Structure formats: structure tokens, C-alpha cells
Image: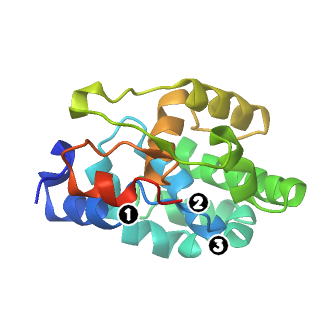
Amino acid sequence: MKKCQWAVSSELEEKYHDLEWGVPVHDDRLLFELLILEGAQAGLSWSTILNKRDGYRKAFDNFDVQLVSQYNDEKIQLLLNNPEIIRNKLKVNAAIKNANAFIAIQQEYGSFDRYIWQFVEGAVIQNDWQHFNQIPAVTRESKMMSKNLKQKGFKFVGETICYAYMQAVGMVNDHTVDCFRHKQLSGNQ
């Protein structure tokens, strides 16, 4: 079965590609998890984050946004000493700040899902890329999302991170047309 070029580097990446990448996500807990993981990836490879994903789930209370929003200095120190995650103080602090901003959006919009999907008008953008190198790193939508998230107090949400997030949560179908997942996810909303 033909797959996206990036997905065949490791078994973990292949599994992520086959089961998750590009699948529309509307669950706030998973939307929060992927937002934190995409931010943690800044400057690193996605495979590094996938290899630490279970560690992140344990360290960050399975991405329970209410719990993460209440992390104190003691918990932050535990996280910074935890080899199962990326021990970057800015990224750890950003996760807590983002949890609080995430909760504020949930209160304002009823759910983070309702807020985040507005950037694609509630529908998956179906792309038809022939080659993986055609896929952009930034789009008009990711620029708008980044600007808005920053205005709402989020950190580690640059335009490129936002586009990677859009791909991860299925707001765009960026599987190449020769990939078996492209057809499966076309029209899946």
C-alpha cells in the first residue's frame, strides 16, 4: 500500500500516519494534547515527539486541561526533571499558559472544537498534492489561526506550528493523492 513519503521512516510514524494524521478531531482533550505536542515539537523532529508521547501523557495527566492549568512551581520542577518529555522551561511553561487560554476559549465558545474549526469554516480542506514537497508549511488559514491564538494568550503557536496542527487534527487532508489515506479521508468530516 502506497503511503506518504514521511510516514515510512519508522514503525511509530507509520502507525501515526495510518491511524491519526489527517483524521478530523473534535474532542477537546485530544485537541489540547495535539496543540501541546505540536508546540513541544518546535525545533525538533515529529518522530522525537511521537517517541515521547506516552511520557507526555503520563507527565501531563493525560492532558487534562483543568489539571494542567493548575500546575504550580513544584509540578513544573518535576516536569523539568522528567526525561520522558522535552525538558524545555519555555515549552513547559507554555503548556500551562496554553491550558489556561484553552479553558478561556472553552468558556467563551462552548468548546475549543467550535473555536478552532472556524478557521476552516467547519469543513476539512481537501488538497490534492501529487508530491509531499508541494505541501506548504504555512497557509492563509494557519496565519489567521496563529495570530488569533497569540492574541488569546497562547505560546508556541507560530504559523508553521499552526499548519502542522491543522494537518494533525484533520482540518486539512494533506495526504498525497497516491497515499491510500487520501481517498479514505476525502469527504470524511
Tell me residue 183's x, y (percent). 31, 54
Q: Are marks 2 and 1 in contact (CB under 8 Å)?
A: no
Q: Residue at x 89, y 54 (%)?
A: 108
Whether residue 18 sits left or right of residue 121 in the image: it is left
Q: Which badge, 2 or 1, is on the more N-terminal residue?
A: 1
* Quadrant of the rendered image containing residue 109: bottom right
The disc at residue 20 is 1
Q: In the rendered picture of this protein, how many numbered marks are placed on residues?
A: 3
| Residue marked by disc 2 | 31
Q: Closer to the camera, 153 or 76? A: 153
State which mark lies toward you, 3 or 1. Answer: 1
Three-letter residue code for mark 3: Asp
Tell me residue 174's x, y (percent). 36, 42
Q: Residue at x 81, y 59 (%)?
A: 106
Tell me residue 27's x, y (percent). 62, 68
| Residue marked by disc 3 | 64
Q: Closer to the camera, 53 or 147? A: 147
Q: Quadrant of the C terminus?
A: bottom right
State which mark lies toward you, 2 or 1. Answer: 1
Three-letter residue code for mark 2: Leu
* Quadrant of the rendered image containing residue 176: top left
Asked whether residue 63 appears in the rendered view, the answer is yes
Which structural element holds mark 3? loop
Three-letter residue code for mark 1: Glu
State which mark lies toward you, 2 or 3. Answer: 2
Which structural element holds mark 1? loop
Whether residue 149 sits left or right of residue 105 in the image: it is left
Q: CA distance from mark 2 to mark 1?
A: 12 Å
